[in-house]
Amino acid sequence: MRKKIILFGLSCFLLVSSGNLLATTVEHNNLVKPVLADYDALIGRWDITIDVNGKTAPAWLEVKVSGFKTLVGYFVSTSGSARLIAEIIFSDRKFSFEIPPQWESGKENLVISGELTSDGIQGTMKDCDAKVYKWKGVKAPYLKRTAQPVWGKPINLFNGKDLAGWKASGANQWIVKDGILTSPKAGSNLITEQKFNDFKLHVEFKYGKGGNSGVYLRGRYEVQIEDSKKDAHPNSVLFGGIYGFLTANEMVAMGPDTWQTFDITLVGRLVTVVANGKTIISNQEIPGITGGALDSNEGEAGPIYLQGDHMPIEYRKIVLTPAKN
């Protein structure tokens, strides 16, 4: 009899405990859900345009939920790579966050303040020199394709003779000599006059010791060219990476003063990079624009552009095969 009483008592205790636990869970969930609903409209990726003294500059923001209610994310400013946001403060449809300097010359944190609007987000950015600029943002497109691409005829973007089909972003330092396209010193970037959506791109390039350049896809996503050490652990800002976002699975850089190749396929946001004959990024999604992008209009076609504002770089073959559809 005593054993039965003990068992009955234990059963009642477990039942009551379970009920309390269930009530606590329901109560907790009731607390969480309204909070989530409040900032649900902010979650996702945003293409941002900043007004810098009357000129537009691109940026990008991704907002995620960490755990039950903490907002975190990534931010790409007008230069540099994607930076982690440890916490985004949100209240009454307004939000703010700050991140430390990266390549900026100033010492203050970059401070972003914004609010949800009927057609997106908007706000101000205080840069690392304490200058304040206004910005607006729209939801970034998914860029999903419903069919496999049908490839058209290859286009020689560089004719081996001159800069026909290209334009410099400023004062031009690019020259063509003996069939080689060269930026002998830091200066302007070189941009195709044509714009493209989905494509395959073959590029042959050579850099010197300490070289640093890049090939921008649609003028928005940089494939990094850098004199990375052969034994370096792969990193998204090293050779072959999509700058700040996607990391090569193997370091295949052949070193300075050697002709090397990229074979890049971009379909929507999905990119494959074959460097020096090895697939180092396979059909991975590019989340958003990288630093140095021409604009943040991700739903539009864009040019190929070659980074010339860093170190000397040479190209001898640039062939693009566009998708027909």
Image (spheres, helix red, strand yellow):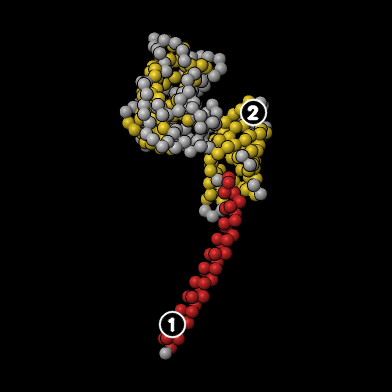
Query: Would you say 322 lies left or right of 137 here?
Result: left
Q: Nearer the viewer, residue 311 or 274?
A: 274
**Could you tell me which residue is drawn at 49 percent across and 79 percent down?**
12
Q: Quickly name the residue at label 2.
A: 52
**Could you tell me which residue is drawn at 34 percent across and 33 percent down?**
279
Q: Is residue 215 visible?
A: yes
Q: Nearer the viewer, residue 119 or 122?
A: 119
Q: Can residue 226 be seen in this view?
A: no
Identify which amino acid the numbered label 2 is placed on: Val
Q: In which quarter of the image is the N terminus?
A: bottom left
Q: Distance between the residues labelled 2 and 1?
A: 74 Å
- Looking at the image, tell me whether mark 2 or mark 1 is earlier in sequence order: 1
Residue 303 image label: none
Query: Would you say 49 lies left or right of 254 here?
Result: right
Above-or-below relation of 81 to 185: below
Q: Quickly name the residue at label 1.
A: 7
User: What percent of the width, then of the height, locates residue 313?
Assistant: 44, 19
